[in-house]
Image (cartoon, grey):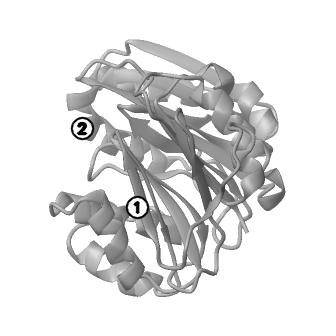
């Protein structure tokens, strides 16, 4: 079932995006109790050559120190932050590293990942802050201090798993490193998943999961890499993708939504002089704006709002 939401502040200034997206997702909690996630753009404040990474590490003796040692071999850590979980005895470790070292660092971390399944590279980002975890929205907000995160636009997700694992890595948003800082949240299924994935793999795309949401973000990033506009890429996806779906793409410039041609997954949107918002249900929109008119997203419709 899943719930998706997106918000853009029209004045291009940072606002309490984490707090607003938290309210929107909490109103959609009934659509997905398994996990939740946020991608909040524009408030990170990193320099051009900096990258944030989130790594999940088991609290097994010595393993966390080993991961930090690998990171420091490639690039000195500017700052770090640790979130612990008593439920699964893990650490979520966030560090700021050099952007030009990330592509060398990421394979090294995956070497540890192959040796020890207790290390998972959750995500890396430059212009957005990604938070995702298993559990309820309010608990994730509290654990990661989401209400303190500022931004210019954001997307979010509550997950009801119908395929793949329920863990931090498989929580939405999904991202790809092909085009920097592209993320996706998705409600539905892509029933011709392998037909879409196969030509992307032949072009060199590397898939980490069998989740169809990962296929979506690779597809859109590939189109953007070919020079398509976001609107053109979304329109092409509606033509190429089969199944019931509604999904939101986040980029450093804004957000876009696409809905399947039969309109089998819900989606509504509204705007006022301050913001544009989209969500699975009207109740989510009303958490952040007073609205009289709510517009239904039509079957096969694409809508893009870029700053």
Q: Choose mark 2 or mark 1, whichever is in front.
A: 1
Location of residue 216 in the rendering, given as x and y in whole percent from the top left corner: 43, 67
Of residues 189 and 290, the one nearer the viewer is 290
In the rendered image, the quadrant that contains the N terminus is: bottom right
**Foreground pick, 95 / 249:** 249
The local crowd at label 1, few if under 14, some if 14 to 19, many if 20 or more residues have their Cα within 10 Å, is many
Q: Residue at x 23, y 23 (%)?
A: 49
Q: Name the residue under label 2.
A: 104
Q: Which residue lies furthest to the front in this view?
A: 292
Q: Quadrant of residue 25?
A: top right
Q: Which residue lies furthest to the top in this view?
A: 78
Secondary element at tag 2: helix
Q: Quadrant of the C terminus?
A: top left
> Which residue in the protein does label 1 denote?
217
Q: In the picture, residue 208 is in which quadrant?
A: bottom left
Whole-percent x and y of residue 270?
59, 51
Which class describes the residues within 10 Å of circle 2: few (<14), some (14-19), or many (20+)?
A: few
């Amino acid at each position: 079932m899943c719930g998706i939401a997106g918000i853009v502040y029209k004045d291009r200034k940072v606002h309490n995006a984490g707090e607003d997206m938290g309210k929107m997702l909490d109103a959609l909690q009934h659509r997905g109790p398994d996990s939740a996630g946020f991608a909040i753009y524009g408030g990170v404040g990193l320099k051009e050559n900096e990258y944030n990474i989130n790594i999940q590490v088991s609290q097994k003796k010595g393993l966390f120190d080993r991961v930090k040692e690998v990171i420091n071999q490639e690039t000195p850590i500017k700052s770090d932050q640790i979130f612990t979980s008593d439920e699964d005895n893990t650490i979520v470790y966030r560090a700021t590293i050099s952007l030009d070292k990330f592509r060398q660092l990421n394979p090294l971390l995956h070497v540890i990942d192959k040796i020890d399944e207790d290390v998972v590279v959750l995500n890396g980002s430059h212009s957005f802050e990604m938070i995702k975890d298993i559990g309820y929205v309010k608990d994730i907000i509290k654990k990661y201090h989401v209400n303190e995160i500022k931004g210019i636009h954001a997307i979010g997700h509550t997950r009801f798993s119908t395929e793949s694992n329920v863990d931090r890595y498989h929580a939405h948003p999904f991202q790809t490193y092909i085009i920097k800082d592209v993320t996706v949240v998705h409600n539905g299924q892509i029933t011709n998943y392998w037909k879409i994935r196969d030509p992307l793999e032949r072009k060199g795309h590397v898939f980490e999961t069998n989740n169809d949401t990962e296929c979506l973000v690779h597809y859109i990033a590939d189109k953007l890499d070919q020079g398509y506009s976001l609107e053109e890429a979304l329109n092409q996806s509606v033509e190429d993708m089969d199944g019931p779906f509604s999904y939101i793409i986040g980029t450093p410039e804004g957000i876009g939504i696409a809905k399947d041609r039969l309109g089998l997954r819900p989606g509504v949107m509204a705007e006022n002089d301050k913001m544009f918002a989209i969500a699975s249900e009207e109740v989510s929109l009303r958490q952040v704006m007073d609205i009289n008119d709510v517009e239904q997203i039509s079957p096969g419709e694409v809508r893009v709002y870029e700053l």
